Amino acid sequence: MAKNKVSTAGQIAIVTGGSKGIGAAVAKALAELGMQVVICGRRVSQLDRQARAIKAAGGKCTPLPCDVGQVASVEGFATEVAKRFSRVDVLVNNAGVGSFSSPLHELDPKEWDRVLDINLKGVYLMIRAFAPLMIAQKSGHIINISSLAGKNALPKGAAYAASKWGLNGLTYSVAEELRENNIRVAVICPGSVNTELSPHAGKDAAKMLQPEDVAHAVTMLVTQQSQSFASEILLRPTRKP
């Protein structure tokens, strides 16, 4: 006998880096599930544009600026979200930056800090800000967007790979910390996605993963039955690009 479909209507979802690429696709998909989506990022004009597109399609979306790598910015964002909505059901940590131009020994320390601050520290700060709300309500999903670079070697991308290996370890550990509070923490590790984040020289964009493929994986996670959760998804294109 088929189980009842999990309802997500009216839930509150946060998507970091939600103005373009994977984040925009995830925000759109969650809005189509009936969620009130809060998108954040550093570029207000891009956030506003994406929010308008979601609303024009019949969804609910609130754009709020936030730099996930800065403690004060994340804390201010969390305060605003709590004031407006009082709860958070889904947190998608998607914001990320790449660095693929040089071997590690030639990398500027400022570039190392930039990548780790956004890709890893930013996830810590968002979980630190919103896990208490989820613990209080005894429910929630935290989904971290990592990469297959967190599983494999990436020459000239060591800082990016380190941030994603670290993100995977963070996810597995936080999942164990929060599971007794009915909070499911998962990581999605896509291969090359057709976005502007990383170089794709020589690859066929039509064969690459698309942002919507990652968004579909997110919707799968947030609509699971309550007795189980997929802690990790490795997402690869059907044909090598």
Image: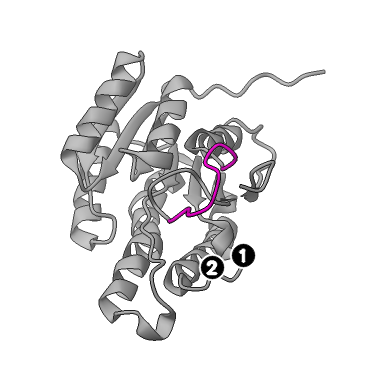
Here the colouring is: one colour
Q: Which residue is mark 2?
A: 165
**Residue 86 image offset from top left, x and y in percent:** 30, 35
Query: What amino acid is labelled 2 in the image?
Result: Trp
Count of numbered circles in the view: 2
Residue 93 place in picture, x, y as percent: 42, 49
Callout 2: helix, strand or loop?
helix
Residue 159 in view of the camera: yes
Q: Residues within 10 Å of mark 1 (few under 14, many from 20)?
A: some
- Of mark 2 and mark 1, the one earlier in the sequence is 1
Q: Is residue 3 left or right of residue 186?
A: right
Q: What residue occupies the far right of the structure in this picture?
A: 1
Residue beneath the point at 40% across and 64% down: 120
Under circle 1, the secondary element is loop
Q: Residue at x 65, y 43 (%)?
A: 229
Q: Does residue 34 show up? A: no
Quadrant of res 99: bottom left
Specify whether 193 is left or right of 238: left
- Quadrant location of the N terminus? top right
Q: Which residues are magenta?
A: 199-208
Q: According to the image, label 1 marks what residue? A: 151
Q: Nearer the viewer, residue 150 or 91?
A: 150
Where residue 176 appears, as percent x and y from the top left, is: 60, 59
Task: Please say if the residues under marks 2 and 1 sit with CB atoms less than 8 Å apart.
Answer: yes
The amino acid marked with disc number 1 is Lys
Q: Is residue 187 left or right of residue 116?
A: right
